[in-house]
Amino acid sequence: MTASDQTALPHERLLETAYRLFTRFGLHAIGVDRIVADAGVAKMTLYRHFRSKDELALAVLDRREELWTERWLVAAIEERAGTAEERLLAIFDVFAEWFNRDDFEGCLFINSLVESHDPTSAVGEASAQKRETVRRYVEELARGVRVANAEDFSRKWHLLMEGAIVSAMSGDRASAQRAKDVAALLLASERPGESR
């Protein structure tokens, strides 16, 4: 193992450990001592790689966007549906499977934004930006369906998505199907040329 590999290894262990703990328990519930203990590194090692817990949290949010948004959510939607309309509705089918997994942990972006208590803080801003990335994906799909106002439509759709997640976190594991039922009505009402 080279010296650079030895340097990279603790960084990745810290990031993986923080990712697992933050997604499961939240940012505020987990302190630096727990992270270094679970990662098997010294506290000074953490501070050599991340200047603060907030910097580590930002790295975890980036990792979550890569793993959850890009590699899982978008990939699963696009794998199961072809047209923009089918993909919009498939979001809730993918959510239904997620909500019923034993490791369902809710949305780190929503949780971190709420926990930050300050949307202008680094963590609050990053959490809001990660949520916005998901909404922009929905807006792109909405443009494919050619609704009258894709941005407004995507904000409504995103509300249904986040509401389903929060409801599932509260124990309603059928919330994805309920949200999909409402989403289908929204989609029908927003199509150009259809009566409202």
Image: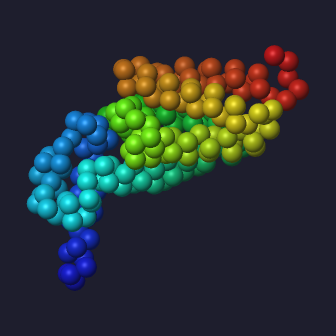
Q: Quadrant of residue 99?
A: top left
Q: Count all numbered tags in the image, as a single digit.
A: 0
Q: Does 175 sit left or right of 135 as displayed?
A: left
> Who is closer to the viewer here, 154 or 79?
154
- Nearest the viewer among 24 and 101 is 24
Residue shown at 81% from the left, 16% from the top:
196
Query: What's the residue at 51%, 45% (across, down)?
Result: 129
Display colour scheme: rainbow
Residue at horizontal 32%, vertical 41%? Answer: 23
Instruction: Give residue 176's position: percent from left, percent from top.
Output: 51, 26
**Rendered residue at 37%/26% (across/down):** 169
Residue 187 can be seen, yes or no:
yes
Answer with left or right where residue 107 lies relative to residue 46: right
| Left or right for 112, reference 178 | left
Q: Quadrant of the N terminus?
A: bottom left
- Residue 29 in percent (x, y) is at 22, 36
Residue 82, image x, y percentages: 68, 46
Determine the image quadrant of residue 183.
top right
Q: Quadrant of residue 112?
A: top left
Residue 104: in sight, yes or no?
A: no
Taking 150 as reference, is 121 left or right?
Answer: left
Q: Residue furthest right?
A: 193
Q: Extreme top residue here?
A: 196
- Viewer-side residue, 85 vs 28: 28
Residue 135 position, x and y percent, is: 59, 40
Q: Is residue 110 above or below residue 170?
A: below
